[in-house]
Image (spheres, rainbow, N blue to C red):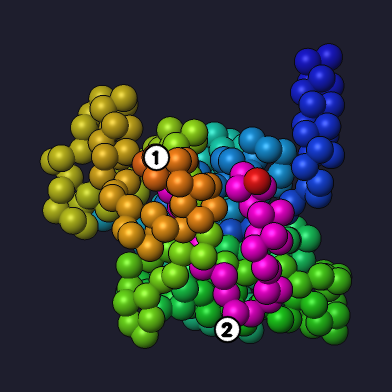
Amino acid sequence: MKGLLLMAATVTGLFAQGEKLHVIAFGAHPDDCDIRAAGTAALFAKMGHAVKFVSVTNGDVGHHEIHGAALAKRRLGEAKESARRLGIEYDVLDNHDGQLLPTLDVRYQIIRKIREWNADIVLAPRPNDYHPDHRYTGVLVQDAAYMVVVPALVPEAPALRKSPVFLYYEDRFQRPNPFRPDVAIALDDVIDRKIDALDSHVSQFYEWLPWVDGKLADVPKDPAERKAWLKRTRTGPINPATRAALVKWYGAEKGNAAKYYEAFEVCEYGAQPDEARLRQLFPMLQ
Ligand SMILES: [Zn+2]
């Protein structure tokens, strides 16, 4: 009964807001989508929309003590736990970590995922990034952007009859051009949900990444202290361009008050939304 009531509430909520949206986010590794979009995913999920994260590699080299199948298995479990905490789905493609190339085979895997999810929104890294897996994930998703509507390609997954909107995650790289925050989402209501999602990737945030940075000794042992440490180290100040975007989308009062955010840049490939369409696609901005 409780389930039925909840379902009715969700459907009514969706009806009131219009379409049910399908959001798919790609990352190279099982934690990349979480870093760039877990807060936005939590907001979409809370509003009854469907979100899927896809890791294009299985993450099987991202650790200093274990690697190969044992690590891939551990990271798959962490990704699934993150999805459970966010109320979304998480797929991990079985391509090796650290060896990703923009091949036809992987491009087809991505086309298939976008079509099967009937995506309205596709999120991905920009193709200029320090890590080759991130860079090629950006290239692969760009290469899929037009092909998702071409029926003769990957015919076993029916082509979309609409062009999704493709957006890039925020990054810090300046060349050849800096990231442009076309959409900025305030995360103040869901920042702890985002930290919970990151917290499920134990092998990364508490082991591998601090080890690479020579900061393993800084990681707290206590679970609550760990989350507080993650929140401190994984959030930062808001730059002027992002603040301006928050004010544009939320108005001066809420935009200036926001402490946590995620930002996205509209890709030139795929559907080109105007401001009104972006507010439909990101209904937390309405
Ligand atoms: Zn990564």
> What numbered label is drawn on residue 257?
1
Q: In the rendered image, which quarter is residue 11 located in?
A: top right
- Mark 2 and mark 1: Cα distance apart in space: 44 Å
Residue 81: give x, y in percent of width and height.
Answer: 52, 38
As drawn, is 228 to the left or to the right of 101? left
The stretch of residues the image draws in magenta is: 261-285
Answer whether residue 175 is visible to the viewer in this image.
Answer: yes
* Pair 2/1: label in front: 1
Residue drawn at 57 percent across, 40 percent down: 42
Q: In the rendered image, which quarter is residue 219 located in?
A: top left
Q: Residues within 10 Å of mark 2 (few under 14, many from 20)?
A: few
Q: Is residue 15 above or below residue 160?
A: above
Q: Is residue 35 above or below residue 134?
A: above
Q: Is residue 254 above or below residue 154?
A: above
Residue 251: give x, y in percent of width and height.
Answer: 51, 47
Q: Which residue is mark 2?
A: 103
Q: Is residue 132 above or below residue 72?
A: below
Nearer to us in this view, 5 or 156 = 5
Residue drawn at 71 percent across, 61 percent down: 277
In the picture as drawn, the residue positioned furthest to the front comes out as 252
Residue drawn at 46 percent across, 52 percent down: 247
Check residue 264 for magenta coloring. yes
